[in-house]
Amino acid sequence: MSNENSKLSFRTKFFFGMGEVPGTTSKTVISILFMFYLTDVVGIIPALAGTIFMVGRMWDAFSDPMMGFITDRTRTRWGRRRPYFLFVAVPLGLFFCSMFIPYPVETQSAKMGVYLVAYILYMTCITVYFVPYLGYMAELTDDYSERTSVSNFRFFFSFIFGLFAAVIPEMLATGFVPEGWKAEVNEGLRNAADLIPYYQKGYMVAGFVIAAILTTFSLIVFFTSKERYVDTKPKEKIQIFRQFGDMFKNKSFRSLIFFYVGAIAGINVLEGFVMYYMNYWIVREDDVPILFLSVVLAGVFSLPLWTMMTKKLGKKMTAIVTMLFWLITQFGWVILKPEHPSYFVFIVGAIVGLGWGAAHVMPWAMFPDVMDQDEINTGERREGIYSGIMTFLMKMGNALAMFLIGLTLQAVNYVPNVPQTGKALEAMRLIMCFGPIVFIVIALAAAVFYPITTERYAEIRADLDKQRKARA
């Protein structure tokens, strides 16, 4: 199950891990800030803001799987995956920052149209980058434990830049507001509209900073990567429906899909709603960066624990334990009250962060094992199309989560930039707790039915080695 050629150098794993930065950084900023930006800064009603997410993700119903087919069949001297890291670097940065520019439009339909177009253009670029990157990950090594190590490098950078993206852009976005003005708005001494020009400037600066990071790291992963499989043979004609049918006949993949979508949707609800929860329920917007810090640091420091657990218990049992733990800790949000001290909020965040971290790590640690099962079934390496389906369904889960947040805010008569009362205030507390739990239960159930145990994977590797020797 392991050999010298399967082992990777520290350099390979380190620079591969850096390739996670564009996806994590942009996704985190959008998950945490974009909905809030649309409703409270641009002034789009919550239902339309949620619709922007939904329509943008529906576009991915086409772009993600098709990008998987395209990258599986790309043949260049740089390989199948690497060229896209170079070609999309600049457009990715440009279209990301276009989502945080204050356009001179007034009507709700015009605002929705402008930001929907910007969002779709960004989504297309991140697909062109991220689908090949995920396919590249599955091809790095055949070793079971080494794949977990590779995932940890990837998620180390994911957590570090997730922390950066959760803290710094929010500080930039709100940092241009004159000192004391937010308190005056809360006390009714100043009109909330007075803050909007300062928020617009702050969000635009944050957009440009993140755009520069996306472009820089896309170029880094191109210039430091080297593909293991560089196949120059032409592929057979694309048979899309046959390949889709083959994928969903794979029980391991079906379980992984439900696990991944449930875990990511839970994360998206948590990240997408935290600004509303802290601004209007806890009423301490200034604590948001430290809360993010506590969640992400707990996730980072939990990585060695999850690695040890996968070695002791296997990936399946680790997935079950971590999802169950995360589900239980979610009840901390409903216990918190505005009168609780800040450190109590941060402690709850850190405890939740342990499960939050595992939800990021486990699906992609399991993904290469499912690819090996698929190769046994079909005789092909199809990481591109599989990762395309994975990212598409992840984005659809994100879209559903954000769309439901928008509809819920609309239903409880949420009004931006003013203290909330009645149904809206109670909704802030309940959604933060029970919104993620709905999706965590889905992930937990999928983990229970996931068929690849450590023992089963040993059998898969043995069968796969025999098949490859027979084809050689």
Image: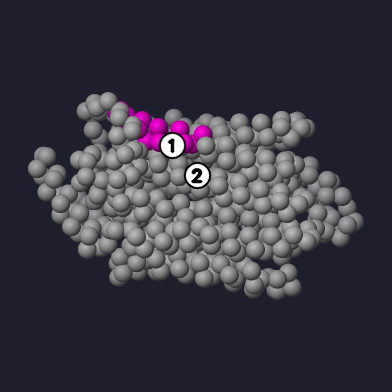
According to the picture, the residue beneath numbered tag 1 turns out to be 64
At 64% across and 69% down in the image, what residue appears?
334
442 sits to left or right of 42: left
Any part of residue 124 in sight: yes
Whether residues under marks 2 and 1 lie with C-beta atoms below 8 angstroms apart, the answer is yes
Q: Residue 5: give x, y in percent of width and height.
A: 20, 50
Q: Which mark is residue 395?
A: 2
Residue type for callout 1: Asp
Taking 411 as reference, is 352 above or below it?
Answer: below
Instruction: Place residue 392 in its image quadrant.
Output: top left
Give the residues drawn in magenta, as a range. 59-76
In the figure, residue 135 lies in which quadrant? top left
Q: Nearer the viewer, residue 285 or 78?
A: 285
Task: Tell me if I can see residue 129 in this picture.
Answer: no
* Residue 461 painted magenta: no
Residue count near mark 1 (Cα–Cα under 10 Å), binned few <14, some 14–19, many ≥20: many
Does 428 sit left or right of 18 as displayed? right
Vertical placement of 6 versus 213: above or below?
Answer: below
Residue 150 % position (x, y): 34, 54
Indicate yes or no whether the magenta region holds residue 65: yes
Mark pair 2, 1: CA separation: 10 Å
Vertical comparison of 186 with 124: above or below: below
- Tell me which numbered mark, 2 or 1, is placed earlier along the sequence: 1
Q: Secondary structure at mark 2?
A: helix
Measured as percent of width and height from the top left, residue 229 is found at 25, 38
SS label for mark 1: helix
